[in-house]
Amino acid sequence: MRPALVLVGLLLPVCAFRVSAQSEAVLRDYFEGRSVTLKQPMPGSEEGVDIFPGTSRPLDYPRYAKRLKEHGTAIRSGESAIITKVKVKSKHIEFQLDGGGYGTMGDETSTNVSTEATPKTRREKNLEAEIKRETDPVRKRAMREEIDDLKREREREDARNRSAVAEAEEHRKQNIRQRRLEGGSRFNIRYQDQLPADALSPASVMAALAEYVDFGGLSEPEDQGQAVSPRSGLLRKGMMLQDVNAMVGNPLNMRQRKEGTLNVQTAQYSTADGRITADFVEGVLVRYTITSE
């Protein structure tokens, strides 16, 4: 393998990681802290609701119903929720609401309360040892009766413990169920192999969830433009600034500004199909438009 090809192979995962990390920053800055309204009930679990955009069955309703039945409804249809976290994974995007759902790391999910059988007393152990050596039938019968009494006392103690454990487990179940109802939920926007570059934008996330979430006053970012020019190939959101420059040439002009803590750049390019105006957030393409010159 040529050295240049080896270098490309090593750089591709790094570039993909940078795009993913910076796209996550764009999504978090756009969504987190905003309020939305749910169009359907959300299960009280970190499993949430799985959505498969672009498929014939984006939502598996039997699995969805099972999670509602098992975990209860954390957010009801028509209720509003705060977007508390957006996280980009290798094959899906987590869209967390009101905490993301109960059952994440640190949340207690087990309802089991451990207990052990009551141990034999020293007296019972001594009697069991002595009865083997005893030869007097009367004393032996008395010792056996005492052993039986001690055993029955242990069994009564075990029964009391089992009753206390059952009560404690029921309280724990109720507590966990209540916490599930208060812990929020999430959508998992899933893709078959890996996240396509055009999925890592606010507009794509909103489109994937449009049937299940009312984004209300949240304005959708413009999602215009597909093919650019034969020279440029196909621009996709999520591309790095230097990659766009390599495809369409250096920009005619570029303006920079701050939006919160993010660096935003607006560049204009001249192509055979018209003038491209592209917005980059932290060097990542988030939207672009094409107008005739």
Image (cartoon, rainbow, N blue to C red):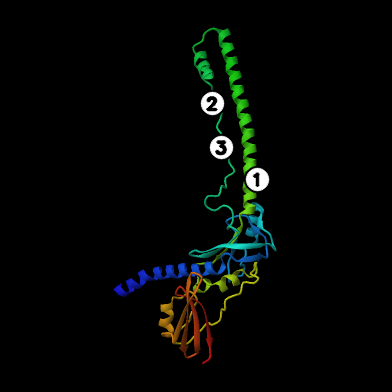
Secondary structure category for the residue under label 3: loop
For image coordinates 54% across by 26% down, the residue present is 119
Secondary structure category for the residue under label 1: helix
Instruction: Looking at the image, tell me whether mark 3 or mark 2 is earlier in sequence order.
Output: 3
**Dot 1 and dot 2 residues touching (CB under 8 Å):** no
**Dot 1 and dot 3 residues touching (CB under 8 Å):** no
The type of residue carrying mark 3 is Ser
Q: Is residue 208 visible?
A: yes
Instruction: Looking at the image, tell me whether mark 1 or mark 3 is earlier in sequence order.
Output: 3
The type of residue carrying mark 2 is Pro
The residue singled out by tag 3 in the image is 114
Instruction: Looking at the image, tell me whether mark 1 or mark 2 is earlier in sequence order.
Output: 2
The type of residue carrying mark 1 is Gln
Residue density around tag 2, few if under 14, some if 14–19, many if 20 or more, within 10 Å: few
Q: Quadrant of the N terminus?
A: bottom left
Q: Which mark is residue 174?
A: 1
Locate residue 135, reporting x and y percent.
52, 8
The residue singled out by tag 2 in the image is 119
Foreground of the two, 37 or 62: 37
For image coordinates 41% across by 71% down, the residue present is 15
